[in-house]
Image: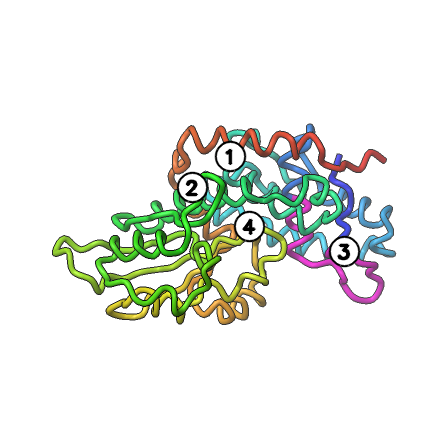
């Protein structure tokens, strides 16, 4: 049994492929990870695409499936031991329960909001919990990617209600830099000015001038609206950095190769998509602590119970 055909990213394909490769692969991964069945074949997928009238020809549909299979194999190689599925010839099989790969499952589930926007809207417009979990997952990832660096979550939430002056003071104290004129360069109503996670290396001499990354964590389907944040020009005014900090942007989605460079250029900084974010789990099965794993599983369960499956 597979998830229903995505309502976004899939279009009728007769003489040209009008199915996005990243959408196709997310659909396959989610179908294998969350289904009660643990194996999916290329024939199953081709039949579903033809029966759903996405493809008129089985041969043309198989072209798409073959491309998708190659991309899925690449994804699982990147994930190493952190993957819960494996590509085995013409089949994809689940090797672990989704609860045992909570970080991976969480990011796949976030990606389904792009494939099924109407389904996603059914969970309401409050994305606070989702955002908090994504920031905390990002923190765990950065601790693995940047060992020895300091990671500090600044993003606003119901639990963290600090306004910008408080956040600025905390960041400035941590990186050992003086505070600038906050009121001149920001609005009074600002929260964290697009800064969700601070990542920096702390030298033992207590001086400023440390390498600093300012992260935006965009967990929603409308992530492009946040691509300009955090604004380095503003942060370089409200804190008098010895040298300009670097910007970074984190997404739960897999960005295709031909798009990655363009998105990275628009970010004007480091870009972490799904498989970069999951890299610590490729060699360390315990990169997420038990508490965060449990919270991710709890968040996931309600959505899994409401997934839309193709029963035909």
Of badges 4 and 2, nearer the viewer stands 4
Which residue is rendered at x = 46% and y = 46% of the image? 135
Q: Tell which of 37 and 299 is nearer to you.
A: 299
Give the Cα separation between the discs numbered 4 and 2.
19 Å
Q: Is residue 104 above or below residue 244?
A: above
Location of residue 61 (image quadrant): bottom right
Q: Mark 2 points at which residue?
A: 281
Number of the front mark, 4 or 1: 4
Q: In which quadrant will I find the N terminus? A: top right
Circle nearer the N terminus (4, 2): 4
Q: In this figure, which residue is indicated by the disc labeled 3?
A: 10
Q: Mark 1 points at which residue?
A: 101
Q: Do the residues labelled 1 and 2 touch (CB within 8 Å)?
A: yes
**Compared with residue 260, is residue 292 higher up or lower down, i.e. above or below?**
above
Q: Residues within 10 Å of mark 3 (few under 14, many from 20)?
A: some
Q: Earlier in the sequence, mark 3 or mark 4?
A: 3
Which one is in front, 21 or 40?
21
The residue at which mark 4 appears reads as 219
Q: Where's the C terminus, which quadrant?
A: top right
Q: In this view, does 86 lie to the left or right of 241?
A: right
Q: Give residue 156's position: percent from left, percent from top.
A: 46, 48
């Amino acid at each position: 049994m597979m998830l229903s055909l995505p309502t976004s990213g899939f279009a009728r394909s007769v003489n040209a492929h009008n199915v996005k490769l990243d959408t196709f692969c997310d659909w396959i991964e989610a179908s294998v990870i969350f289904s009660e069945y643990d194996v999916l074949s290329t024939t199953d997928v081709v039949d579903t695409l033809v029966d759903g009238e996405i493809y008129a020809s089985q041969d043309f549909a198989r072209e798409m499936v073959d491309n998708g299979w190659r991309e899925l194999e690449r994804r699982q190689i990147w994930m190493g031991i952190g993957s819960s599925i494996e590509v085995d010839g013409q089949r994809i099989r689940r090797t672990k329960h989704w609860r045992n790969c909570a970080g991976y499952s969480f990011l796949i589930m976030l990606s389904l909001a792009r494939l099924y926007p109407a389904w996603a809207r059914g969970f309401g417009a409050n994305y606070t919990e989702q955002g908090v979990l994504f920031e905390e997952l990002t923190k765990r990832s950065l601790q693995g990617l940047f060992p020895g660096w300091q990671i500090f979550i600044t993003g606003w939430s119901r639990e963290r209600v600090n306004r910008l002056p408080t956040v600025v003071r905390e960041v400035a104290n941590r990186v050992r830099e003086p505070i600038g004129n906050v009121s001149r360069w920001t609005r009074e109503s600002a929260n964290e000015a697009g800064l969700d996670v601070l990542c920096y290396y702390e030298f033992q001499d207590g001086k400023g001038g440390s390498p600093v990354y300012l992260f935006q964590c965009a967990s929603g389907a409308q992530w492009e609206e946040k691509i300009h944040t955090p604004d380095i020009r503003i942060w370089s005014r409200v804190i008098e950095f010895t040298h300009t900090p670097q910007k970074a942007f984190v997404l739960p989605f897999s960005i295709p190769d031909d798009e990655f460079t363009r998105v990275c250029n628009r970010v004007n900084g480091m870009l972490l998509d799904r498989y970069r974010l999951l890299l610590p789990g490729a060699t360390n099965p315990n990169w997420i602590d038990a508490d965060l794993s449990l919270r991710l599983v709890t968040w996931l369960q309600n959505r899994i119970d409401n997934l839309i499956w193709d029963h035909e």
